[in-house]
Amino acid sequence: MRRVFGLLFAVGGALITLGFAFAVTFLIVPFAVLPRGRRERYAIHGARCFAWLVLRPLLWLRIERVGLEKLPREGGYLVLSNHRSWIDVPLLILCTASQGISKKEVTYIPFFGMNGRISGAIFFDRTKKMDRARVVSDALFLLRSRSNLHVFPEGTRTRDGRIGSRIYLRLVQTCWENGIEVVPACVWGTEAVVPSAGIYAMPGQPVGIEVETPLDRAAFPDGEAYAEATWAKVVEMARRRGCDQPFRETTGA
């Protein structure tokens, strides 16, 4: 019964989410008239509104927030996080006021792609090496413009619960080279809301996010060392939260 409920809730929730995205469009689209680099700082509030609608009234998640006071007071920071579920994205948007770097397919979802682009999301084709290089330059432009971004160095959400072994830290190195703060973050419990396999959604789950103070850039000889140390901090946080272990079955029979 739990599995059937999860399937039905996922279908109904998807339709409601689309309705939320349509409604929030009226909060975000007006800022499209502003030049890129300025509009994102205002439109992100509409994106956070959408994230709240999905996480609280719809999914009714119990969100534990740890260390959010450690976020830099000034905008223009990059949040580095592990990746457990699709829910990670709205959770990071809501709690860290940051938009994401995502695969281009999201741009084809009605309202999501347009709203995301206006509020600072960066979309790219993961199969094209040149597109990856463009992401770095686009991200650097937005970060210098005092917008916030988040990125998942694992490239995609984990399929088994373990931390990915292949990671991409080029953007973090670029941040070190340009004096941009990188915030280590960890999310947990989100896989119980939208599991990695199948089409299910389970409301009312406990989820959490923790952030740490950015590492001191001056303490590292180069961007590579800084990037590896920052990711090591994320992994340390994830292990402390049990986020490096295989998933447990959450949907039931």
Image (cartoon, rainbow, N blue to C red):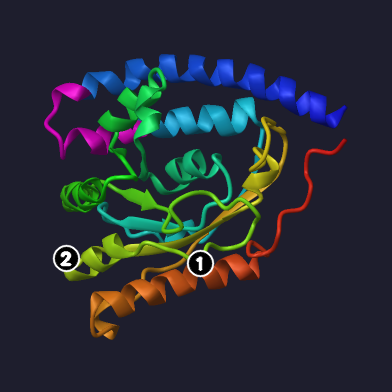
Residue 221 position (above or below residue 128): below
Label 2 crowd bin: few (<14), some (14–19), many (20+), radius 10 Å: few
Identify the residue under disc 1. 165
121 lies left or right of 158: left
122 lies left or right of 188: left
Q: Amino acid at mark 2?
A: Asn
| Percent coordinates x, y for residue 38 in the rendering | 16, 37
- Quadrant where the C terminus sits is top right
Task: State the CA–CA distance, disc 1 to disc 2.
Answer: 27 Å
Residue 239 position (above or below residue 81): below
Residue 43 in magenta? yes
| Percent coordinates x, y for residue 1 in the rendering | 88, 27
Q: Amino acid at mark 1?
A: Ser
User: Residue 2, located in which quarter of the rendered image?
Assistant: top right
Residue furthest to the left in view is: 35
Q: Is residue 44 visible?
A: yes
Mark 1 residue element: loop
Residue 138 position (above or below residue 53): below
Which of the two labelled residues, at mark 1 and mark 2, occupies the earlier sequence position? 1
- Which mark, by number, is residue 178? 2
| Percent coordinates x, y for residue 62 in the rendering | 67, 42
Residue drawn at 27 percent across, 45 percent down: 128
Q: Is residue 65 visible?
A: no
- Which mark, by number, is residue 16? none
105 lies left or right of 242: left
Residue 178 position (above or below residue 194): below
Which segment did they paint magenta? Answer: 32-45
